[in-house]
Amino acid sequence: MKGKSLLLFLVLIYSVAFAQKKSAFQKTPTGLEYKIYHNGGKVKPVAGDLIKTILVYTNHKDSVIFDSRKVKNENVFELLAPTFKGGLEEGMLMMAIGDSAVFKVNADSVYAKTFKIKRPNYVKKGSKLTFRIKLLGIKTKESIDQRTPEEIEKDNEARRLAEPKLIQDFINLNKIETLASESGLYYIERQVGSGPAITKENKVKIIYNCTTLDGAIIDTQTNPIEIDMAAGKITKGMEEGLLKMSMGAKATLIIPSSLAFGKRKISTVLPYTTLIYDLEVIEVN
């Protein structure tokens, strides 16, 4: 009986060791840690392609920072050349359609060189972000947009002219009685804050949900993100709204494109898109 127990124990230990070895991360010469689960696909992206993915990434505590499955819009973006040695892009260039993968990437470099924003406090300095990705599809540069520059300009102009009516229709539909400011911003107070109003000298921490007029989610931050009001890195509409708020305040901002990204296309945000922010001020320094 003891012999059988010992044998079962040894088999269990061997199985666990084999599973751990099989699931261990590999490492590229540049230091990128990765696991790729191939699904038989052969078509791989190249830098400049538009790729469709399911993307989830977590911090050093395995807390979810972003989950594309919770966003209404498809997670489609241009795959750039690696932004640094060992960058996430290097890993995605190794994948084929249908593959799933896990990558561990230096958090400091991701925020500084890929995202080009300040590393948030909930991501530890020197830690690694874990990205879990499934590659669903690829569009080449040639297939991204077949319109001529003239057609693009015509479409953008139509969007610009249509925006005021779309905003007014949204206001009427939702029975919003708040009037726009002189700039065109709608500031709808949801909860009164305490203390003095935020100034351009403050650093504030906020959480928010950003959508378009039709409800498509653009971005969600459930972990407080710090904004330096003096840095000039937020849109005019966001700045104007925050300057009306104080500690603990909640508000909805309806930001016309003239106070947001204007005629620029930013990721999935088309030119002349109105943005709606539901935000809360968590901290003021």
Image (cartoon, rainbow, N blue to C red):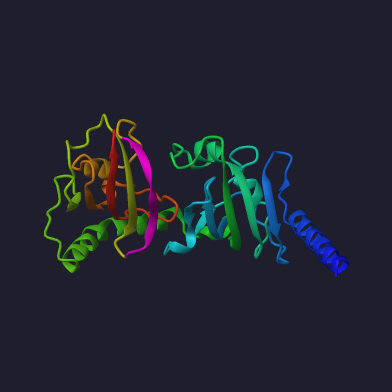
Q: Is residue 121 left or right of residue 209?
A: right
**Closest to the observer, 257 or 126:** 126
Q: Is residue 42 left or right of residue 78?
A: right
Question: Residue 161: x percent and y percent?
Answer: 25, 58
Question: Residue 102: x percent and y percent?
Answer: 63, 54
Name the residue rendered at 53%, 58% in the picture: 144
Question: Residue 186: x percent and y percent?
Answer: 19, 52
Name the residue rendered at 88%, 66% in the picture: 3
Question: Residue 266: x percent and y percent?
Answer: 42, 50
Q: Is residue 94 left or right of residue 251?
A: right
Range drawn in magenta: 215-228
Quadrant placement of the N terminus: bottom right
Q: Residue furthest right?
A: 3
Q: Is residue 40 left or right of residue 144?
A: right
Above or below residue 130? Residue 146 is below
**Closest to the observer, 123 or 216:** 123
Can residue 93 be seen here?
yes
Based on the displayed image, in which of its 4 quarters is residue 160 positioned? Answer: bottom left
Based on the displayed image, in which of its 4 quarters is residue 20 positioned? Answer: bottom right
Name the residue rendered at 72%, 45% in the picture: 27
Q: Is residue 223 magenta?
A: yes
Q: Is residue 268 magenta?
A: no
Kindly report the secondary structure that dominates the magenta region of the rendered protein.
strand
